[in-house]
Image (tube, rainbow, N blue to C red):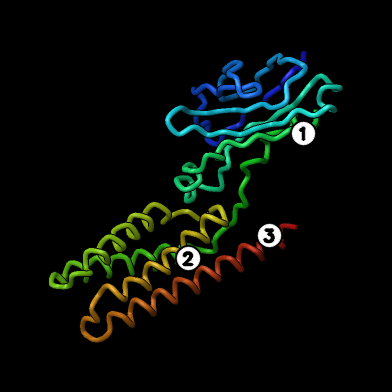
Amino acid sequence: MLTLKIKTIFVYGWFSLRNIKLYVDGVLFTKFLAQGTSIIEIPDDVQKLTFVLGKVYPYKTTIYITEEDRKRKEIFIGLHLNHRNLLFFFYDSLRTDYLRSVKLTVEEYVLFGKDIYQQEMITLKNNKTSIISLLVSLVILVFSVVQQENELAPLAFMIGLSSTINSLVYFKDLQVEKSTYKTRILSTVASFVLVILFLENSYGSLHFIIFMFTALLYFFYLDNIKYSISQKNYSQ
């Protein structure tokens, strides 16, 4: 018999009360909890192991058994989610390969999970990006309501509303995950530029005001990135 030692580490403890099905050469062999460590005995002549999570839209991942594995008698496997960050969670979770498996050495097995979901954190110089984003969002909200006869105004209203909520949620955060911060700011900039197409140029300067503050938002974003890099270099 071969001994499987499986370590399941899911970000934020997601699916921890669910069972993962283990298929041996395409046939259901057993189930185990989607958390912690599981030890399972399987036949020596196994060729393929398939791990399945979920029923309606199952996530699947496969491990192939080699001759070296049979000689060692023990196979160390790590299970994790293909999780990048919360902004990409919905997109990632729609993929059938959201569940990932990896064959490990004994040393890797012991350390597995300690840094698999670790994201690069940065310190912002200030919260000016949140302030500017909130101001522009409120301007968009006001003018999307004022321009009742504009058929595209509801689109601008939705962008303004979501940007306002987003700005308030992150308003006081000065410690942020780098890729999430980048995605959030760049998507906000793109949304504000798009709003210019949706709103009429009220009083002859609305488009200029939105564009000017959007450019200022991007400038403050670059300033925060430079500041975080300088802080990192200083600490080293």
- How would you rate the neighbour count of disc 3 (Cα within 10 Å): few for under 14, some for 14-19, many for 20 or more? few
Mark 3 vs 2, N-terminal side: 2
Residue flagged by tag 3: what amino acid is it? Lys
Taking the view exactly as shown, the residue that stands out farthest to the bottom is 204
Q: Secondary structure at mark 3?
A: helix
Report the residue marked by disc 1.
108
**Residue depicted at 41% across the width and 74% down the height:** 214
**What number of labels is visible?**
3
Report the residue marked by disc 3.
232
Q: Give how far apart the Cα atoms at labels 3 and 1 are.
A: 28 Å
Where is 202 relative to 224, above or below? below
Where is 175 relative to 217, above or below? above
Mark 2 vs 1, N-terminal side: 1
Taking the view exactly as shown, the residue that stands out farthest to the left is 149
Residue flagged by tag 2: what amino acid is it? Leu
Q: Which x, y percent locates residue 198?
A: 27, 72
Report the residue marked by disc 2.
186
Mark 3 vs 1, N-terminal side: 1
Q: Give the side of residue 75 with respect to residue 18, left or right.
A: right
Q: Give the side of residue 216 with respect to residue 1, left or right.
A: left
Where is 181 relative to 114, above or below? below
Q: Secondary structure at mark 1?
A: helix
